[in-house]
Every structure is written in structure tokens, then in C-alpha cells.
Image (cartoon, rainbow, N blue to C red):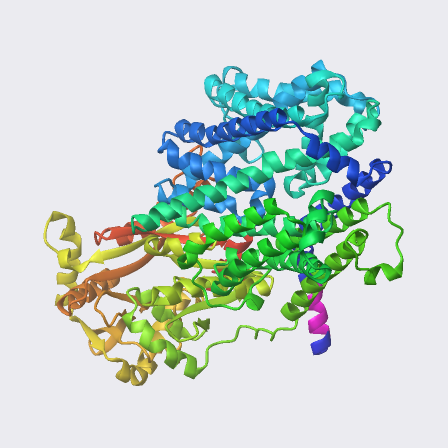
């Protein structure tokens, strides 16, 4: 006899099952933070004899010519990065206007260089831009593959050649392996360029196939990538002190190794890691005395190569929005999609700048001016509030990315307040100008932040939390570095002084910012727990009924099955029906409702609901006209099949192509078959006579009832819909429940059953009679349902999912009648419309597909047993 499972054991098992998913979610961000901490510790050791004043002194002594040349090289470098996308589009035969492509590429690379692609979904911005430009999933995948390959080929080429020509400082780790590593790295681009000549056919790498491009295209990739990296190195080189010995080649060897270390660390921008390797490299070559000037040049490099392009992006956005307002025209969709992530990234940077500024010494000359015009209490409050605002901006950046109206208003207020406090705490007009510039760019974009949801209800991903923690860690390191000459004493917390109060002010500001972050985290954690998904109550189904009939897709009426939870908007203007399987929170179809604002908000709400539970939001069988809803929240789209819809105004049985159908219908009429449409109120009394037909069909097909996207023989569900019944001799031989739109836009069937020994062509007869009936009732379309995996292309450069789906469609008849189902529906001359799966980037697609299949089949066992 089995022991009953207690609630405690069940909870313990749930925790154990959730641990691997939790570890996977946090492993990457925690690794990045750990590497950052290790790099800052090493940096602290390397700078043991260096003071902050020395670093600041070199920074402010940089010549105007040096800075101008560095800016020029930065402009050239970012111009080169736009060639990645331009050449990629040319390689796939889909060139687009270079002006638009260059804007998207510039902003995307400004984000990826500074913050990392994954943090602000800048990759999704490009994805949406290319989707709206008419590129398919396969073409976008090829663009991404081309640009990524060029990026790494250029780095390999530059690193390999440099390591072969220039010896690595012996004090660096793995210095002895410099030349072998150079040979290996240099061989990769060479093999790529000559691959087409050496291997005529694609190379097999397990299940992958690698086809080298033509030599000219491969050479273009290598040259663009190498030029990009070379110009970046040039920016830093012109900012370095003249006393750095060894020339550009020696410098380049250390630079490429530092960049490799930064990329491998996964720390955004290689922050801390890049600086540590650069200092270690020059220290190993006997230039420890130049640590302060080198660190000053690295700080200038961060500003020129990373921060200035972000400021330029803000200026471009401001000018473009101003032009759009002047012409009183809406901005292009591809550009408006760019705005929220762009503003989120800039807000994150501004918050970090305020925190870093609060952690460092003010300039003596400016502080002397402040001492004459600003009272000490006002200075202290301004310094403290500037850092607190910096932390709040880090938090609000997430709200901007999620398009929250409250985050927009608060960010505008705090940017202006931050600019004022920056001037009052140290006459930091550079920071104030940046904050005001962002406020000016953000002000006219209110329509992009339309969501009325609470910031406390917004989910913060592991990456976002890690980014905020990383900024705080860096600010703490800056406090320790800037005031390392000050001996700590508990009385410092209460010292207030113009001349000697820098360290106490920095400590108070850092603690205040950390306290704000902790208070927000606590408030976020103690919010009301979300209830676990439950089947809808009768009251919820009644709330959904008014929305179902007016929705143009009959798929919405599957909510009446009662096996899917319902998520309504605040005013019952729309709802999403969904179920949970594993980590996948799967919504069936698009949000149901006529109010576009409510439908758009529900996509955000559903994503946040699933993410707070540690799940993956998935939208199954979404329509082409609603793809914008999912692109806006950063999801990617995969085609999963095509839906057959028959235009009833053109449907008839005339002509040679319909001869078989016409003969079948006429024959069955002569055999005494007749179709009856039974109203919903009479269906309940009829179900006992239909039950034997359903049971016989299930036994004959050796299947069991499906769920989720298909109806089942559930009396409560069937009694809510009309029923089409085929009679012969007073007995039912086939039936199907009808899904009808009140607007007469579409008619469809869900549950279809017939007796196994019924006359041949029975289902053809049922469909033809139903279409003729629906046409006579004034319906525009008859929906025959989806043909899974239909329309997927098995091409050599298509994404793996599309190739796999096409292969299963063509050769998977053993598991499911994919081709047969498509051929059967095609004989009614339907219009085929694609259907998509919307999933977040980076999820395990095979797991999601298995979860969806399990939902439909009633568990994975049902998938195997049919």
C-alpha cells in the first residue's frame, strides 16, 4: 500500500524540482558578478601605489588633439560596424536602404558595446526592424549569423597576426602559449576564406552543416571585423601616455588579449576585466610606474568609445522625434520600437554615472566656487540625493523597458532633479547636460509608455538584478579607491565639511543608494502572492462570453472548455486563456477582445505573470495580424504551420476540380443522409445519443481525448455551442460542434466524430453541407483548422527549427498524418494563413514544444500513446 504524499513532502519535491531551473537562470549573471568582483580585487592590488588624484590628474591633462583624434577614430569605428549589417543583407540578397540600416546598426552596437545585447534586448530591436522590413525568420537568422561570424573572425585575425608578430609580455599568464595561440587564431579566418576552395560540399559537424561562403564574401567579413577591432584599439592608443614603450604592436598584443578576457567574462562591456588585464599587461612589461596614466587613459577610453556613442544615439532620437512632431506624423513602426529600450539603456547609464560621481572626489576648483555660493547643508543634501536618484534610475530603467507610464513620469522628474543636484554637489555640468539631454529626448515620447501597471508588479530578470548589483559594487570600489588615503573611523559618518567631507559624503551617499535598492527589493518581494493558475469559475466564463462572440477568430471559443485559466485586463475588455506545463506558460491564440490597448497590455501582463513564477511565456497559434504585439515585448516568432480558411462567397461545387466532392454529396443524399443544425439549448438532451458515436470513434482510432487546443466530449462544453448532426435512418452517424462568431466573420467546427462503419465520404459530406449552410447564413469564412508544420521550408541556410519541421512534415507520417491532413483540407480550396509560436529569446525550444504537445495530449504519456 502506497503512503500518502504529505503537503510538506510535496512542497519539498517542488523545491527540488525547481532548483535546476533556478540555477540555470542565475548561473550566468552570478558568474558575471563574481568575475567583476574578482577583477576589481585584482585591480585594487595592481593600483596599491596609485592614488585617485594621480589618475584624475592625467585624465584632465589629456590634450585636445588626443581627444579629437580619439573621437574621430570612434566615429570611423562605429561607421565600420554598420557595414556588418549592410554586407549581411547584400549577402542574402535582401538589400535595404542604408540610411535606415545604419541607424539601427549604430544604436544596436552602441548598446551591445556598452551594456551587452541580452540586457536591453537590442537584438530584438533589430529583429523587429527586419521583420517589419519584410525579412523572414530564416533571412534574419542568416543576417545575425553573418554579423556574429564577422565579429569573431575579425577578432581572431587581428589577435592571431598580432601574437605571431609581437611577443606577449612574459609576466602574463599563458605568455608561453602566445605563438601557438596566434597560429590557431590566424588559421581560423584563413580556413574560412579558403573554405569554398578546399571543401566544395558543406562540412558535417554532428547534426550541423557548415557551408563556407565564397572567398570574396569571407574576405569581406574578416576585413570588416579586423578593421572594427583595429579602430577600437586605435582610440585607446592615442589616449595612452607617450611614455608607453614598445609601439603600437606591443600595445595591440595586450589590447586584444584584454578584449578577449572581457568577452569571455560576460561582464557588460568587459568592465573591470578589460582594465585589469591592460594594467597587468603593461605591468608585466616593466611599466608599473605608469599605472596611474594608463588607468586615466582607460577611463577616457570608456567615455569616448562607449559613453559618447550612447549620447549621440540620444541626440539622434531627439532630432528624429522633433522632426516627427513638427510634421505631425507618426514615426515609423521600426523606429518607435527602438525608443523604450533605448531610453531604458540611457537611463541605466545615467543612474550609474550619478552613483560613480557620488563615489569620487569633487574637483578642487569647482568645490572652491561652491564654498562661496552654496550652504554646506545644501551641498550635503545634494550629494546624498544625487546618489539616491542614481539608484532610482537604475530601477526605473526596467519600468521604461516595460513601457510603464509611471516609470516615464518619474524618470522625467528625477532626470531634471538629478541635473540640479549634480550642479549643486560639485558643478558637474557634464553630468547635468547628459541628464537634461535625456530628459529632452524622453519628453515627447510619452505615447510609447502607455502601460498603467505598477512598477512593483514588474518582474526583474536575473540579468537586470545582476546589472544593478554590479553598478553598486563598482561604486563601492570607487569609494575605496578614491579615499584609500583616508583612515576609516566610525565618527566619519557624522563629519560635515567642505574641505575634508568628501569621504563621509561618499560613504553616506553609497549607503543611501544601497538602502533604496534594498527597500525596493523588500517591497517587491512582499507584494501579494500571485495565485496558482486554476480552472475558470462559472462567473469567469460568464465574463468571457461577451468577448467571445465578437472576436473574429472562432478559436477564442475554446475558452468554454474550462480547462484553461483566464487572465482578464482590469476592465474586462480582453482576456488571455492559458495553461501551464513544466516551465511553459502557454497562451492559446491571441488575446481575446476588441480593445487593442487592453490586448496589448495583456501580453505584457501575461509575460510578467509567468516570469514572476519562473516560467516561460508562450503564445501558441498566433495570427499574422497580431505579430506586433509579441515583437513589442521582445519575443521571437516561429512558424508552426498554416491555417486553412475557406472564403464562403467563392465556395461552390462547380467545375471539374469539385467533381469528386459533388458526386460524394449527391450519393449520400440518395442514401438518406441529412444534416441538422441543433441549437445550443437542445444539445444537452441530444448528448446521450451522440456519446456512443464518440466512444466508437475513439476506440476505432485508438486515441484518447485531447485538450487545450482541441475540444473533448465534455457535456458542459458541448451544451454551450450549437451542434451539426448527420442523420441516417433516424440515427446519428456523425456530429460536430459549431463555433460561430456573432459578427458572422467566421464559422468553424471543433469536436468531430463519426461512426467507424459509416458510408464512405461521410466527413466530406459534413464539411460541404456545413459550408453551404454557413454561406446561406451570411458567414464570410469557414475555418478548417491548422495543418501543423505546413509551409516550412527545408533549405540549406534555413534555421534549424524550420528545417526540422519541414523534415517532420515530409517524413513524419508514422507519428502524425501531416501531409494527409494538409491534402485533405486543400481540396476545399482554402486560403492558407500562417500561424506562429511566440517565445522569449533564449528559451529551450524543444522543451517548449514538448510542453505544448503535453498540454494538447493530456501529458507526455498521451503524446506517446496518441
Residue at 15% x, 52% y is: 658
Relative height, residue 686 to residue 128 (above, below): below
Foreground: 415 or 610? 415
Residue 440 in view (yes/no): yes
Relative height, residue 268 to residue 371 (above, below): above
> In the figure, is residue 766 to the left or right of 545?
left
Question: Would you say residue 253 sits in the magenta stretch?
Answer: no
Q: Position of residue 2 (x, y in %)?
A: 71, 76
* Magenta span: chief secondary structure: helix
Residue at 67% x, 56% y is: 374
> In the figure, is residue 519 to the left or right of 747?
right
> In the figure, is residue 830 to the left or right of 517?
left
Residue 183 in view (yes/no): no
Relative height, residue 585 to residue 436 (above, below): below
Q: Which quarter of the figure has residue 665?
A: bottom left
| The N terminus, quarter of image | bottom right
Tell me where the magenta segment starts and ends, as one range. Answer: 9-17
Question: Would you say residue 15 sits in the magenta stretch?
Answer: yes
Q: Which quarter of the figure has residue 206?
A: top right
> In the figure, is residue 273 to the left or right of 213?
right
Amino acid at each position: 500500500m502506497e503512503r500518502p504524499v504529505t503537503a510538506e513532502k510535496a512542497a519539498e519535491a517542488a523545491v527540488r524540482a525547481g532548483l535546476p531551473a533556478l540555477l540555470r537562470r542565475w548561473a550566468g549573471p552570478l558568474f558575471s558578478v563574481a568575475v567583476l568582483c574578482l577583477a576589481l580585487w585584482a585591480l585594487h592590488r595592481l593600483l596599491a601605489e596609485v592614488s585617485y588624484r594621480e589618475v584624475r590628474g592625467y585624465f584632465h591633462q589629456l590634450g585636445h588633439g588626443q581627444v579629437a583624434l580619439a573621437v574621430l577614430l570612434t566615429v570611423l569605428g562605429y561607421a565600420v560596424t554598420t557595414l556588418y549589417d549592410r554586407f549581411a543583407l547584400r549577402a542574402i540578397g535582401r538589400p535595404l536602404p542604408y540610411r535606415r540600416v545604419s541607424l539601427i546598426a549604430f544604436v544596436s552596437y552602441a548598446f551591445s558595446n556598452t551594456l551587452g545585447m541580452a540586457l536591453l534586448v537590442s537584438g530584438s530591436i533589430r529583429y523587429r526592424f527586419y521583420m517589419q522590413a519584410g525579412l523572414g525568420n530564416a533571412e534574419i537568422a542568416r543576417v545575425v549569423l553573418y554579423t556574429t561570424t564577422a565579429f569573431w573572425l575579425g577578432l581572431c585575425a587581428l589577435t592571431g597576426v598580432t601574437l605571431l608578430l609581437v611577443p606577449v609580455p612574459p609576466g602574463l599568464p599563458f605568455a608561453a602559449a602566445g605563438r601557438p595561440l596566434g597560429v590557431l587564431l590566424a588559421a581560423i579566418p584563413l580556413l574560412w576564406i579558403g573554405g569554398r576552395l578546399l571543401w566544395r560540399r558543406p562540412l558535417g559537424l554532428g547534426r550541423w552543416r557548415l557551408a563556407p561562403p565564397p572567398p570574396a564574401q569571407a574576405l569581406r567579413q574578416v576585413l570588416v571585423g579586423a578593421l572594427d577591432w583595429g579602430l577600437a584599439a586605435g582610440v585607446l592608443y592615442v589616449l595612452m601616455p607617450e611614455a608607453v614603450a614598445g609601439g603600437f604592436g606591443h600595445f595591440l598584443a595586450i589590447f586584444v588579449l584584454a578584449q578577449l578576457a572581457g568577452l569571455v567574462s560576460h561582464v557588460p562591456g568587459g568592465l573591470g576585466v578589460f582594465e585589469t588585464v591592460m594594467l597587468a599587461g603593461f605591468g608585466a612589461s616593466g611599466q608599473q610606474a605608469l599605472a596611474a596614466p594608463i588607468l586615466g587613459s582607460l577611463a577616457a577610453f570608456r567615455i569616448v568609445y562607449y559613453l559618447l556613442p550612447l549620447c549621440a544615439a540620444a541626440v539622434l532620437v531627439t532630432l528624429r522625434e522633433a522632426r516627427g512632431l513638427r510634421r505631425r506624423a507618426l514615426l515609423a513602426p521600426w523606429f518607435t520600437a527602438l525608443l523604450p529600450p533605448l531610453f531604458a539603456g540611457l537611463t541605466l547609464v545615467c543612474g550609474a554615472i550619478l552613483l560613480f560621481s557620488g563615489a569620487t572626489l569633487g574637483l578642487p576648483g569647482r568645490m572652491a566656487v561652491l564654498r562661496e555660493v552654496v550652504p554646506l547643508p545644501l551641498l550635503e543634501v545634494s550629494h546624498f540625493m544625487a546618489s539616491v536618484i542614481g539608484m532610482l534610475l537604475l530601477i526605473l530603467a526596467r519600468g521604461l523597458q516595460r513601457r510603464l507610464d509611471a516609470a516615464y513620469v518619474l524618470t522625467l522628474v528625477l532626470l531634471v532633479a538629478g541635473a540640479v543636484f549634480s550642479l549643486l554637489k560639485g558643478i558637474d555640468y557634464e553630468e547635468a547636460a547628459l541628464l537634461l539631454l535625456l530628459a529632452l529626448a524622453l519628453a515627447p515620447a510619452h505615447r510609447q509608455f502607455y502601460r498603467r501597471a505598477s512598477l512593483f508588479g514588474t518582474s526583474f530578470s536575473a540579468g537586470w538584478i545582476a546589472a544593478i548589483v554590479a553598478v553598486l559594487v563598482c561604486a563601492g570600489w570607487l569609494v575605496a579607491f578614491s579615499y584609500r588615503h583616508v583612515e576609516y573611523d566610525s565618527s566619519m559618518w557624522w563629519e560635515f565639511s567642505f574641505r575634508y567631507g568628501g569621504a563621509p559624503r561618499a560613504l553616506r551617499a553609497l549607503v543611501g543608494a544601497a538602502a533604496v535598492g534594498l527597500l525596493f527589493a523588500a517591497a517587491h518581494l512582499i507584494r501579494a502572492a500571485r495565485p496558482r493558475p486554476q480552472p475558470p469559475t462559472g462567473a469567469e466564463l460568464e465574463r468571457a462570453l461577451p468577448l467571445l462572440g465578437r472576436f473574429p477568430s472562432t478559436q477564442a471559443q475554446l475558452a468554454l472548455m474550462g480547462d484553461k485559466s483566464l487572465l482578464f485586463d482590469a476592465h474586462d475588455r480582453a482576456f488571455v486563456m492559458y495553461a501551464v506545463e513544466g516551465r511553459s506558460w502557454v497562451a492559446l491564440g491571441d488575446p481575446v477582445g476588441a480593445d487593442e490597448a487592453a490586448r496589448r497590455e495583456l501580453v505584457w501582463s501575461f509575460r510578467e505573470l509567468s516570469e514572476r513564477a519562473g516560467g516561460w511565456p508562450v503564445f501558441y497559434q498566433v495570427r499574422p495580424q497580431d505579430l506586433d504585439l509579441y515583437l513589442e515585448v521582445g519575443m521571437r516568432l516561429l512558424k508552426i504551420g498554416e491555417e486553412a480558411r475557406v472564403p464562403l462567397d467563392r465556395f461552390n461545387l462547380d467545375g471539374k476540380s469539385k467533381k469528386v466532392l459533388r458526386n460524394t454529396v449527391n450519393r449520400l443524399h440518395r442514401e438518406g443522409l441529412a444534416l441538422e443544425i441543433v441549437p445550443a439549448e437542445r444539445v444537452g438532451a441530444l448528448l446521450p445519443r451522440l456519446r456512443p458515436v464518440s466512444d466508437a470513434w475513439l476506440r476505432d482510432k485508438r486515441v484518447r481525448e485531447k485538450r487545450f487546443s482541441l475540444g473533448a466530449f465534455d457535456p458542459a462544453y458541448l451544451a454551450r455551442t450549437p451542434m451539426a448532426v448527420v442523420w441516417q435512418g433516424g440515427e446519428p452517424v456523425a456530429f460536430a460542434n459549431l463555433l460561430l462568431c456573432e459578427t458572422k466573420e467566421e464559422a468553424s467546427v471543433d469536436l468531430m466524430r463519426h461512426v467507424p462503419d459509416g458510408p464512405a465520404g461521410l466527413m466530406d459530406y459534413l464539411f460541404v453541407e456545413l459550408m453551404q449552410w454557413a454561406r446561406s447564413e451570411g458567414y464570410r469564412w469557414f475555418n478548417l483548422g491548422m495543418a501543423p508544420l505546413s509551409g516550412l521550408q527545408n533549405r540549406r541556410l534555413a534555421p534549424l527549427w524550420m528545417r526540422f519541421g519541414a523534415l517532420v512534415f515530409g517524413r513524419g507520417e508514422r507519428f502524425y498524418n501531416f501531409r494527409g491532413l494538409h491534402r485533405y483540407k486543400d481540396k476545399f480550396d482554402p486560403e492558407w494563413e500562417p500561424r506562429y509560436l511566440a517565445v522569449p529569446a533564449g528559451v529551450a525550444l524543444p522543451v517548449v514544444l514538448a510542453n505544448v504537445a503535453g498540454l494538447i495530449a493530456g501529458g507526455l504519456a498521451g503524446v506517446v500513446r496518441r
